[in-house]
Amino acid sequence: MSLTMTDQDRAESALRAHVTSVKEDLMTGVSFMIPFVTIGGIFLAVAYAIGDTQAVFGNTGSAGWFLAQIGVAGLTIMVPILGGYIAYAIADRPGLAPGFLLAYILQQGNVVAEAATVIGISGGEAGAGYLGAIVAGLLAGYVARFFKNLDVPEFIQPMMPVLLIPVATMAVLTPIMLFVLGVPVALANEALTSFLQSMQGGQAIVVGLILGGMMAFDMGGPVNKVAYVFATGLITEEIYAPMAAVMIGGMIPPIGLALSNFIAPHKYAAEMYENGKSGIVLGLSFITEGAIPYAAADPLRVIPAIVAGSAVGGATSMALGVTMPAPHGGIFVVLLSNQPLAFIGSILLGSLVTAVVATVIKPDFEDRVDTRTETSSTQPTDD
């Protein structure tokens, strides 16, 4: 029986290690992708601001047109960059080119549509999007790592990372990605994009509640990163409302808790007051981790408060149709939003909700310390 439990524990440990590794590989790809998204989103937003939104691409030679070209280039290349650096994180240099090229091919709607025709399915004209890049990057990384770990003659080893492994990886995965995985992923991406573009009313509010709440739940942890990657990927499809909800949801926790600290300092340790001042700055900069000191001190009360506030902020943003084409920057990119005042208003509303909930449910700090002291003193001892 103990052996069985040991085997089960080992299996669970291995699974957790693998999931953690996949998350780290994904976040490596995202970290390399972010500068391209930032450049693309900001330049495109500025192009729309100084030129007509509909005619900017037709007004060749204008300042808006040149800015739009840079913006489109950044948002186009970000997807292959994501796939390439996910593979790079797994297999190092041999995985980079296959991951990049496979992710790039899956963005070509005409190629995916022809692959769909070959296997008797219609659709795929929009390409596989960032979902396809994630799949391509992971598979390219694992296949390249397999080839990398093969025991080959010494005279072949110098050719492995720059020639044999990239070519072999592409040869193995190209038919799989095009005819087995690429088309279904492209259809799923198309369905997701259509749903998000058609969202209105209650649907938009629910999505905002979920994304905002996820951003606050673990303050920069895996749940937060899932919401962030989801919204960032949608920028490539020119869907900007989820990014606004995510950014607002990530800004609210430090701001809301700082407000609660300022309103009711007797509910917090004295040293937390200074943390509140920095929390305002971190929150405005879209650094959710500024709320961690508060959560570490009292997680059972703080986490529900910040989730409530961020969910309200995200839902309000989605309900009002607020957009944000930049993936980072916080208050410093607020003018890129289609509704800057509504963007700020959503932050303020969510922060007030967090501040009110935290202030109401938290007891006085001295009372909480006394309760803990009494509890520890009543614990049985071995004496």
Image (tube, grey):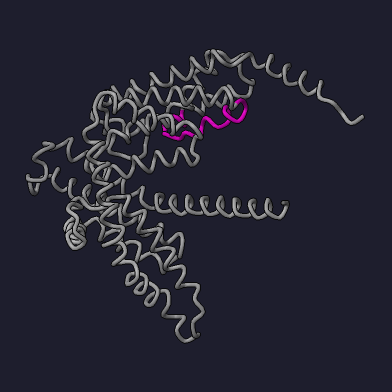
The answer to which image quadrant residue 14 occupies is bottom right
Relative to 128, is 304 above or below? above
Relative placement, left or right, of 8 versus 196 is right
Q: In x, y percent, where is residue 153?
A: 49, 85
Relative to 220, is 355 above or below? above
Magenta stretch bounds: 281-298
Q: Residue at x 37, y 70 (%)?
A: 169
Q: In x, y percent, where is residue 32?
A: 39, 53
Relative placement, left or right, of 108 versus 52 is right
Task: Farthest residue to the right: give it.
Answer: 383
Q: Nearer the viewer, residue 317 or 134?
A: 134
Q: Nearer the viewer, residue 344 or 159?
A: 159
Q: In x, y percent, where is residue 12?
A: 59, 50
Q: How many marks?
A: 0
Q: Residue at x 30, y 67 (%)?
A: 174
Relative to 102, is 333 above or below? above
Q: Main secondary structure of the magenta part?
A: helix
The answer to which image quadrant residue 197 occupies is top left
* Residue 292 forms part of the magenta stretch: yes
* Residue 375 forms part of the magenta stretch: no
Q: The C terminus is located in which quarter?
A: top right
The answer to which image quadrant residue 47 occupies is top left
Q: Residue at x 31, y 54 (%)?
A: 132
Q: In x, y percent, where is residue 90?
A: 46, 61
Q: Residue at x 61, y 52 (%)?
A: 13
Task: Farthest residue to the front: give it.
Answer: 1
